[in-house]
Image: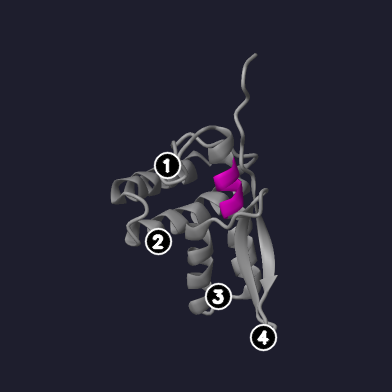
Amino acid sequence: MATSAVYRYYRAERAISGDGSTYWVVASDAFELHTEACAYLVGLRSDDRACTTQGTYAGRITLHLSYCTENAVDWSRPAAELLFRDKGTANKIMGSVEEFLTWSALQGWVPASVSSARTAFAASVKRWW
């Protein structure tokens, strides 16, 4: 009998702290926080990004993480060939993922070469449209 792979799907969740502050987190379907994504969202908050912006980025990052886990791709070393529904979706998701990967490279979680290669790919995607 063949064994099936276990995929982790991620989603953006609003978390309310004891003082009533709203934070965005990225959690798996098993309610495990994605440490790096959550740290990135804290960084957005500390940069005074709007709560809605944080939520938007959280949602786009969850798409990336879920895609990677479903396709057995290390989130910190993604392949360039990601599929998107349309031009607007590609630009928005790629922009958010690029910022997340670049920030993660600054933290030492992602090789700098991955971030620079993804940036070059993102530029080529924009030329396609």
Q: Secondary structure at mark 1?
A: helix
Residue marked by disc 4: 19
Residue marked by disc 3: 49
* Magenta segment main secondary structure: helix
Q: Verify whether residue 28 appears in magenta.
A: no
Magenta residue span: 61-66
Residue marked by disc 2: 103
- Structural distance between the alpha carbons of marks 2 and 3: 15 Å
Q: Secondary structure at mark 4?
A: loop
Specify few, some or many for label 1: CA neighbours under 10 Å numbering under 14, 14-19, or 20 or more: few
Q: Position of residue 26 (x, y in %)?
A: 60, 58
Q: Identity of the amino acid at label 4?
A: Asp
Number of numbered markers: 4
Specify few, some or many for label 2: CA neighbours under 10 Å numbering under 14, 14-19, or 20 or more: some
Q: Identity of the amino acid at label 3?
A: Arg
The numbered mark, 2 or 3, whose residue comes first in the sequence reads: 3
Specify few, some or many for label 4: CA neighbours under 10 Å numbering under 14, 14-19, or 20 or more: few
- Give the residue drawn at x 45%, y 59%: 99
Report the side of 59 relative to 99 (left or right): right
- For the residue pair 36 and 114, the one nearer the viewer reads as 36
The numbered mark, 1 or 4, whose residue comes first in the sequence reads: 4
